[in-house]
Image (cartoon, rainbow, N blue to C red):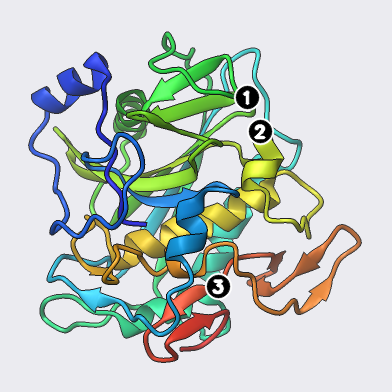
Amino acid sequence: MLRRFASTSFVLLVVLSMASPIYASGGNEGDTPPGAGSHIFGVVWAHGREAASVHNQLGGSNLSYHNGPVMLTNKTYAVYWVPAGYSVSSGYESLINGFFQNVAADSGKSSNVYFATTQYYNSSRTHILYSSSFGGSYVDTNPLPASGCTDSYTSVCLSDAQIQAEVDRVATAQGWSRSGAEFFMLTAKGIGSCAGTSCAFSYYCAYHSNFNASAGNTLYANMPYADTVAAACDSGQHPNGDDADPTINVISHEHNETITDMWGTAWYDRRGNEDGDKCAWNFGTALGSTSSGQYNQVIGSGKYYLQQEWSNHSSGCVLTGL
């Protein structure tokens, strides 16, 4: 969802003051939570937030184009920030890497939620391609900085500025190009985060945004460990029998939104909802079940339970096609 959170963090103000200007949206903010006014957008609202139920059920209100850039093709990178004393589930990294690989392997197919992005275009009316690649992953054991915020559920909390700084550090150290890429920062279980006064599990399950760095403008997504607070961010089905399942669902939300609205200036509706927001927590009809749970997507060799994505062509939420 197109949202802006104003930070009260001195650290964030310092980082932003040293960077080039953040690309802001065209001003369609929708209804904003406490702390609204900054560069954060693409919020997956936690279960129970009033904004989710109000803004996601907009019927035939299609997305409009606001002349900003889109990702015609895209490359993904995964960073798993798992310092000493923290952990992720046994299959977390392999399942999420496998998801990115499967999304890439099925590029061009109309059989999953990513194909819906191909109806949207840039200012030259060049349509987005379902053309994704996976650039790789990195397990980051760098110690956490001192808490940059305070949230309701965890004992350590990362500010958006701290998330940005670690994305930038890892991408630089790994030699990863920023061009056409999105970096997914996946923090370990029990690590919280806040963007201004709005925090993980209380307000959001994930968000996407961008920042300028010496290496270039950087697209990233903050992906807290969804089952840190399952009541807030779980998808309800675990077809792979792992905590990775609900995180993969919100990854899909943020990935699709970044493709269609990379700087918050491209595709969103009259209330600020991006393509993922309008179908958030709406999973459609399951295709089948594994021994661990239902799935509604078969992507490459994987089975997943993902929310639907908005289609202007259908004026509704879709799992496949347009």
**Quadrant hosting residue 216:** top left
Q: Residues within 10 Å of mark 3 (few under 14, many from 20)?
A: many
Residue under the image location 78 percent in, 60 percent down: 239
Vertical relation: 188 (above or below) 212: above
**Visible residue check, residue 107:** no
Residue of label 3 = 308
**How far is mark 2 from mark 3, CA to CA?**
23 Å
The residue furthest right is 291
Query: What residue do we see at 11% from left, 76% from top?
Result: 123
The amino acid marked with disc number 3 is Gln
Q: Which residue is mark 2?
A: 228
Label 2 and label 1: CA atoms lie apart by 6 Å
At mark 3, the secondary structure is loop
Q: Quadrant of the N terminus?
A: bottom left
Q: Are marks 2 and 1 in contact (CB under 8 Å)?
A: yes
- Foreground residue among 9 and 189: 9
Report which quarter residue 62 is drawn in.
Answer: bottom left
> Under tag 2, what secondary structure?
helix
Callout 1: SS: loop
The x and y percentages for residue 35 are 30, 34
Q: Where in the figure is residue 29, as x and y percent of width and height?
A: 24, 55
Q: Residue at x 60, y 53 (%)?
A: 248
